[in-house]
Amino acid sequence: MLQIQYIRENREKVLEGLKIRNFKNPELIAQAILVDEERRKLQTETETIKSEANNLARRIGEHFKKGEKDQAEALKLETRLLKDKEKDIDTKLSELTVSIHDILVQIPNIPYSLVKQGKSAEDNEEVFTSGPASSGTFAPHWEVAAKHKLIDFEAGNKITGSGFPLYCNGGAKLQRALINFFLDEAVKAGFSEYQTPLLVNEESAYGTGQLPDKEGQMYHVTADNLYLIPTAEVPLTNIFRDVILKAEELPLKITAYSSCFRREAGSYGSDVRGLNRLHQFDKVEIVIVAHPDHSYNTLEMMVAHVKSLIEKLELPFRILRLCGGDMGFTSAMTYDFEVFAPGQSRWLEVSSVSNFETFQANRLKLRFRNEETKKTQLAHTLNGSALALPRIVAAILENHQTPEGIRIPAALVPYTGFEILK
């Protein structure tokens, strides 16, 4: 969430950023400033009333000392009237504070300077490609999975519903191998490993920007008012909600594997077949809390980490810098990683790596203290998938087909215990 002070002081910059995003409600900026002006005016009035009340209290004491009871009682009446007025203003202030908040939660983050204007994925910038995509004839992963009995989509559909695959035999082992490989690589890169809850409360979902859930993508356990996590980013980042860190602790790097749950409401068509789009899937997430001065260097480091993972899996891939119209609500800049799936002749997104700057930290009240100045300021938060498993599995099954079976990338063999998936 943007800070109202930042919006006031950078109105034109904010409007320009929203234009890059193709934000359809820029009038919210003017509304937020107007409501805040009214709030500040009432706040000044409250301070004046408190000053007058303190002055009256002093005068009342002086009258009592002199035995001037009538004058003291008259001033007491004035004090009561002032307190009633202050109470009315406090009520209005509370209402205005809620109004400002309700406006601010509708305003997305402001894009970083490198983010270009665009309306959709077609306008994203390709900043890296690993080389030519695989050539030849390849079967799509759902046919490979059926042939080798790796994934039972029908059984998953019977047990739960579509979008909940059942991994079995070599498919289950491949999943486990990938999870361990991704976690070990993250730990080698300096990330501390956590195991998080799969359900979070409303405050946690709000803190990282999943609530308000305008698209209805979260699974809600209504009886307990808890939410199934769409990514481990949510519990990981909320570890630091309402926390003041020391500047020397930054950057703070953490990682976790978790199952993830997304309703994917409104997703239909051929792009959802097989592992392309699921309601439940596994993912290793990396999260960093960084100093604002260094967060974009940190972002590039995270990009390099994800890049190394895909290279070790020997998959053709590309990196895109998202345009304003394709970025998530909370992000200031995002890189997407896509692997090529030759069995489908299409690119599949396997990771998004984002810098949120202070957008999440403001909601979370996540700050750090400069030990020299003793002042606190909002930290920057970043996260990325490192990596999401379903489309990585799809890409492995489609890219590494041989007459003997599916070839396991060399880096993964110590985790699978076999070189060919038959």
Image: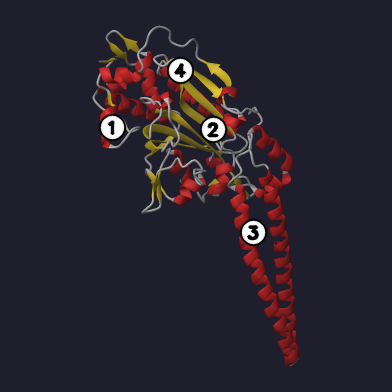
- In the picture of the structure, the residue carrying the numbered disc 1 is 156
In the image, which is nearer the foreground, mark 2 or mark 3?
3
Number of the label disc, if any, that sits on residue 95: none
Where is residue 407, by image quadrant?
top left
Q: Which is nearer the N-term, disc 3 or disc 1?
A: 3
Q: What residue type is disc 2 on? A: Ser
Three-letter residue code for mark 3: Leu
Please, is residue 186 above or below residue 65 in the view?
above
Q: Position of residue 315 (x, y in %)?
A: 42, 16
- Cα separation, mark 4 vs mark 1, equals 25 Å
Q: Which mark is residue 96?
A: 3
Q: Label 3's element?
A: helix
Q: Residue at x 71, y 88 (%)?
A: 73
How far apart marks 2 and 3 lie (CA) works out to 32 Å
Q: Is residue 369 left or right of residue 162?
A: right
Residue 150, position as x, y percentages in the image: 27, 23
